[in-house]
Amino acid sequence: MHYVRPVLPRAGGYALTVAFPRGRGTASATLTYELESEVAGGWPSLRRIAGRTSDDGRTTTFAVQAALRADPRLAHPLLVVSNAGPRPVRYAVSAR
């Protein structure tokens, strides 16, 4: 498993793309984040952003909405890339 902490800009368009150049195989990518509690001392809620797969499964794109990025409670975005198979899978991450 690999963990990547992306820096999300507070304004403008933003998409995070994970590309598997030789195919995804058994690998997967998930983008999670926390929303801090509205009540002091309360637990944050852990959430996911659904990815959109394209290029025959070789690319997963996570579009992070501007309203979420502007939310002051947004904390700890985390991209998790995991490979459940015995062979390594190459991947590249890009943001736009």
Image (cartoon, rainbow, N blue to C red):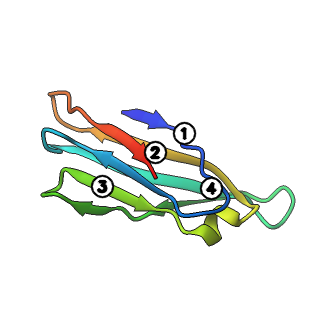
Q: Which residue is mark 2?
A: 79
Number of residues whose C-alpha sits closer than 10 Å to that of mark 1, classed few (under 14), some (14–19) or many (20 or more): few
Q: Which residue is mark 1?
A: 5
66 vs 31: above or below: below
Q: Which residue is mark 4?
A: 34
The tag earlier along the polypeptide, 4 or 1, is 1
The tag earlier along the polypeptide, 3 or 2, is 3
Judge by depth and name the residue closer to the eye, 82 or 10.
10
As helix, strand or loop, the secondary structure at mark 3 comes to: strand
Task: Please give the name of the residue rendered at 62% of the width and 55% of the height, measured from the top-left corner.
Answer: 34
As measured in the structure, the alpha-carbon distance from the residue carrying label 3 to the one carrying label 2 is 12 Å
The tag earlier along the polypeptide, 3 or 1, is 1
- Where's the N terminus, which quadrant? top left
Q: Mark 3 and 1 residues: CB-CB less than 8 Å, in contact?
A: no
Q: Mark 2 and 1 residues: CB-CB less than 8 Å, in contact?
A: yes
Residue 8 coordinates in the image, percent (x, y): 60, 51
Q: Which residue is mark 3?
A: 60
Circle 2: residue type: Leu
Q: Nearer the viewer, mark 2 or mark 4?
A: 2
Q: Nearer the viewer, mark 4 or mark 3?
A: 3
As measured in the structure, the alpha-carbon distance from the residue carrying label 3 to the one carrying label 1 is 17 Å
As measured in the structure, the alpha-carbon distance from the residue carrying label 4 to the one carrying label 1 is 12 Å
Q: Nearer the viewer, mark 4 or mark 1?
A: 1
Number of residues whose C-alpha sits closer than 10 Å to that of mark 3, classed few (under 14), some (14–19) or many (20 or more): many
Number of residues whose C-alpha sits closer than 10 Å to that of mark 4, classed few (under 14), some (14–19) or many (20 or more): some
Task: Tell me where residue 83 sits by quadrant.
Answer: top left
As measured in the structure, the alpha-carbon distance from the residue carrying label 4 to the one carrying label 3 is 21 Å
Circle 4: residue type: Glu
